[in-house]
């Protein structure tokens, strides 16, 4: 099979992409980049090669008044074709945040699948509508091109019933009100490479902390999800860049009933105005918070570390112990003070950190005597999507 797979992660104003060559079989990463300015009168096309060296940087003037998802993908398709022979994009893999109860594996996209996924938009309003808009944009350009949805919820379908339930009437659960979990594509990648870092311990009791602008943690045994911090939506669990994390539902009732806020106002508050941004009153950028001595910045960082430690305690209890702790994603892989702060608060688990290894970003940051291995592993969701798409293409 010849050609390329495009991996797409679409947002409201940008399309992030990775291109994988399949001319020799298993997908091989060759380019990554993004088109920004969707919905604006001028866009920006950026691309890097496999060594992450810049190879394209150009302003884009849309054909109409605003740059569209269709124009962004057309530009990407033409750009790839001009550089390779054969250079056609033969399939597109999409990160789709929510697959609901129906999808525990990747799905070839058609109108029936899209209809089901559109019903899930209220459960992931920051992501799902834009994921689906990109899918429709690609279909409008080339209706015959294979498109595959790869779901952030799918990895967590292995969890037992107690992890999926809310203490609500059964009829509500039957309507889909249950815990789902997210960041599954990241966890699937970490699970796939974990033996390279910790050997046979990969199948023991593992917690993976995916700490980025969105943040969650997942407890794994036998490299399968047994518990996770996110639930019905991507608001639950840890505080995030702009999302609140776990919140007493009575707060929402109070905001609506006593303060007169509308559901739209509450949605904006919980998704876009809370988290690190709300706590600090300054920024959701962890790098800036760590570099700032302001009391509010310190409070936001301290609270973030506190909540991570608390959730690690809960996940450890579910598994009756802990053998491996993994940090990943933007903050987890790059913010050594956060890792240090978390691990310093887990001495009851006998975690011992090699301070120098942590500060220099080594793969293993625990000491050789530590009963719990602590690792830093960059995640690679794009490769998971490329491989899942390639499997569908090969069927």
Image (spheres, rainbow, N blue to C red):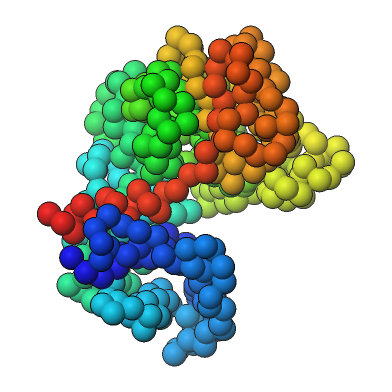
The residue under the point 56% across, 82% down is: 58
The reply, left or right, for residue 341 in relation to residue 392 is right
Front residue of 344/371: it is 371
The reply, left or right, for residue 72 in relation to residue 332 is left
Front residue of 157/279: it is 157
Residue 112 sits in quarter = bottom left
Q: Quadrant of the image for the C terminus?
A: bottom left
The reply, left or right, for residue 331 in relation to residue 166 is right
Q: Quadrant of the image for the N terminus?
A: bottom left
Rendered view: 19 above or below 76: above
For the question of whether residue 2 can be seen, the reply is: yes
Front residue of 340/200: it is 200
Q: Position of residue 288 (x, y in %)?
A: 76, 49
Residue 248 sits in quarter = top right
Front residue of 313/58: it is 58
Q: Position of residue 261 (x, y in %)?
A: 59, 46
The reply, left or right, for residue 370 in relation to residue 194 is right
Q: How many marks?
A: 0
The residue under the point 49% across, 15% down is: 322
The residue under the point 30% across, 21% down is: 160
Q: Position of residue 281 (x, y in %)?
A: 76, 47
The residue under the point 80% across, 36% down is: 298
């Amino acid at each position: 099979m010849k050609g390329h797979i495009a991996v797409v992660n679409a947002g409201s104003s940008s399309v992030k992409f990775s291109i994988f060559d399949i001319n020799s079989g298993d997908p091989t990463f060759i380019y990554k980049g993004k088109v920004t300015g969707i919905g604006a009168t001028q866009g920006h096309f950026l691309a890097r090669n496999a060594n992450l060296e810049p190879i394209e940087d150009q302003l884009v003037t849309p054909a109409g008044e605003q740059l569209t998802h269709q124009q962004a993908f057309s530009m990407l398709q033409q750009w790839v074709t001009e550089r390779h022979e054969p250079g056609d994009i033969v399939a597109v893999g999409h990160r789709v945040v929510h697959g609901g109860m129906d999808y525990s594996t990747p799905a070839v996209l058609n109108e029936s699948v899209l209809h089901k996924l559109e019903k899930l938009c209220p459960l992931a309003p920051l992501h799902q509508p834009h994921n689906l808009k990109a899918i429709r944009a690609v279909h409008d350009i080339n209706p015959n091109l294979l498109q595959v949805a790869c779901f952030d919820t799918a990895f967590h379908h292995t969890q037992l019933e107690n992890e999926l339930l809310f203490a609500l009437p059964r009829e509500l659960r039957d309507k889909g009100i249950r815990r789902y979990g997210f960041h599954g594509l990241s966890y699937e990648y970490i699970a796939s490479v974990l033996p390279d870092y910790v050997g046979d311990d990969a199948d023991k009791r593992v917690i993976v902390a995916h700490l980025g602008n969105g943040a969650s943690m997942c407890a794994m045994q036998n490299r399968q999800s047994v518990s996770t911090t996110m639930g019905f939506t991507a608001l639950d669990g840890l505080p995030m860049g702009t999302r609140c994390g776990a919140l007493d539902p009575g707060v929402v009732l109070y905001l609506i009933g006593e303060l007169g806020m509308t559901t739209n106002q509450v949605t904006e508050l919980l998704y876009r105005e809370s988290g690190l941004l709300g706590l600090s009153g300054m920024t959701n950028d962890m790098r800036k918070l760590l570099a700032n001595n302001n009391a509010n910045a310190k409070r936001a960082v301290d609270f973030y570390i506190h909540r991570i430690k608390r959730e690690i305690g809960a996940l450890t209890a579910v598994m009756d112990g802990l053998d491996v702790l993994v940090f990943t994603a933007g903050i987890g892989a790059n913010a050594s003070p956060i890792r240090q702060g978390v691990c310093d608060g887990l001495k009851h688990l006998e975690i011992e950190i090699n301070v120098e290894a942590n500060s220099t970003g080594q793969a293993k940051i625990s000491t050789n005597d530590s009963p719990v291995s602590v690792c830093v592993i960059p995640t690679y969701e794009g490769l998971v999507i490329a491989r899942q798409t390639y499997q569908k293409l090969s069927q």
